[in-house]
Image (tube, rainbow, N blue to C red):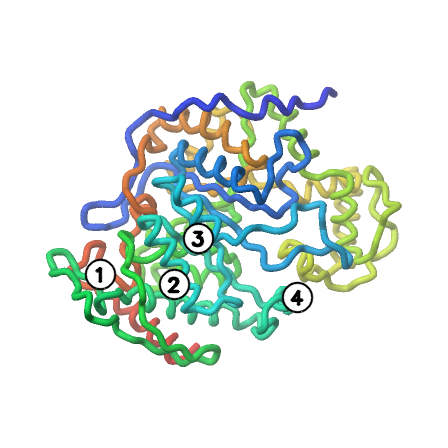
Amino acid sequence: MRAFDARRITGSGRPVGGADPVGGTSPEGRSERRKGIQFGVFFQGVNSSTVWNVPESGSQTDFESFRRVIQTAERGLFTAFFLGEGLRLREHLGRLHDLDIAGRPDALTQLAALSAVTEHIGLVATQNTTYNDPIDLAHRLQSLDVLSGGRAAWNVVTTDNAWTGENFRRGGYLDHADRYTHAAYVIAIARRVWDGVAGGGAAPGPGDAPADPSVLPEPFSYDTKYYSVRGRGVLPRSPQEHPVLFQAGDSEEGRDFAAHNAEVIFSAHGDFEGAAEFAADMRARTVAAGRPADDLKIFPGQEFIIVDDASETEEKVRWVREHQISPQTAVAFVEALWGTELSNLDPEGPLPDFDPVQQITGETRGAGFRAAKAVETARQWRELSAQRGYSIRELVIHLSARRGFAGTPSQIADQLERFAEAGVVDGFNITPWLVPGGLDDIVNKLVPELQERGVYWSEYPGDTLRENLGLRAPLTRRGAGRAGGTDEATATDEDTAGRRVASGAE
């Protein structure tokens, strides 16, 4: 079989146009259920799912890669550009794991630079609640929000392992069971920082006189089992008042945390049935938390592989998968489970016939390799390989396959239209399999197809990320008489939750 021609992976760069905008925010600031699809983009940087070994592959640290991806996304009217976080270089058997790209620039620094070359797209920074000072983190996030004109967002993540913590003076201090309790304190403190306004204790409401610049913001204090902090807000609020809160936990605790705190949740449930079940569960949890069912937007992660002719689909998918998982990557994947070097292993042959030398895998290769029961997992891999006739590399490709859509723009649009009509997602967070050109086909071919069907907007409906997502005012800003205010029960529930967090109750 001939190799897939990598020169066919990018599009023409033509501008996007089409149907009327879909969705938005009502004049009262209420969220409106939209029969449409939004897109975000996840620039991962560190992973084995991006093809790094072809001439079209760019750098994961050069500013030009970030600039091209985000400007292509904005040309395609994407809602948000999302950066991950890496607090320690990944290791493999005690050495730097250089088969994945190693190291990422700080997200807030990178997004501050990108805000100057974009106008509308949201800027989502992954920031850890465990290893950041809460007031300092809140100030840095608010700085991005103010400088970008209300386009900043915080993807809230928790980390508890001591291996990552070795890079910080408080490494490993947090028990796994406490990670979300701790994160709730950090969010509560951040909201107090954002609610304070330089030149006054609160921002003026509609029709109110401007804040007196000589008046200090109201001070606040929090005494918790983790922090004793005293502080004041030091910046004015942006046009969207607070950075938007994203979250991606999928455990029972993670889902409950999102229902109480987040405004957007990333999901691993990208197939229709899984997405529908996840949406029903999250909306029920959101209502139970005292919020409207549509207060939490849902964005599953997805990969898109687009072809011009349906007959090319299988070939292109195979080309992408084989370039994502090289022979060396396949062997390293097995070594991570076995816990020992297997340099003589043939990636086109069978798995080792002996059991792993470790019982539980560590975290040095990232969350996807953490805490697996090695011997039991090896047995499952052998059984699957025997059933399907997999070589090692074929097995790793199968285990690593991304969620996603493959086909012509029309075929993929048919599937996305089903999601839009059912309302089971608000959008998809796209992981490009190539940097920096991985969005070109999506923007040049798929977006116009969706616009023609009326399920994708032709212009940004608002000026801020909050408006473009169709979100209400931040939870602590929903007082009576304010734009975006909700019912009293929601505001009261949030106030109570804030007091509970502030007092240290769990």
Give the CA separation, mark 3 to mark 4: 27 Å
Between label 2 and label 1, give the one nearer the viewer.
Answer: 2
Q: Which comes before the other along the chain, label 2 or label 3? A: 2
Going by the image, does 57 lie left or right of 70? right
Q: Contact, CB < 8 Å: mark 2 with mark 3?
A: no
> Which quadrant would the N terminus be assigned to in this image?
top right
Which residue is labeled 3 in the image?
Answer: 265
Question: Residue 3, located in which quarter of the rendered image?
Answer: top right
Q: What is the distance, in whole Å, between disc 2 and disc 3 at their CAs? A: 23 Å
Of the image marks 4 and 2, the number of the one nearer the N terminus:
2
What residue is pinned by disc 1? 487
Q: Residue at x 59, y 36 (%)?
A: 433
Q: Disc 2 designates what residue?
A: 139
Of labels 4 and 2, the one closer to you: 2
**Local crowd size for mark 4, using a 10 Å CA cut-off: few (<14), some (14–19), many (≥20):** some
Residue pointed to by mark 4: 163
Look at the picture and state if 186 lies above or below 291: below
Q: How packed is label 3: few (under 14 Cα within 10 Å), some, or many (20 or more)?
A: many
Amino acid type, residue under disc 4 in the picture = Trp
From the viewer's perspective, tell me whether residue 461 is left or right of residue 104. Answer: left
Q: Nearer the viewer, mark 2 or mark 3?
A: 2
Query: Which amino acid is tagged 2?
Result: His
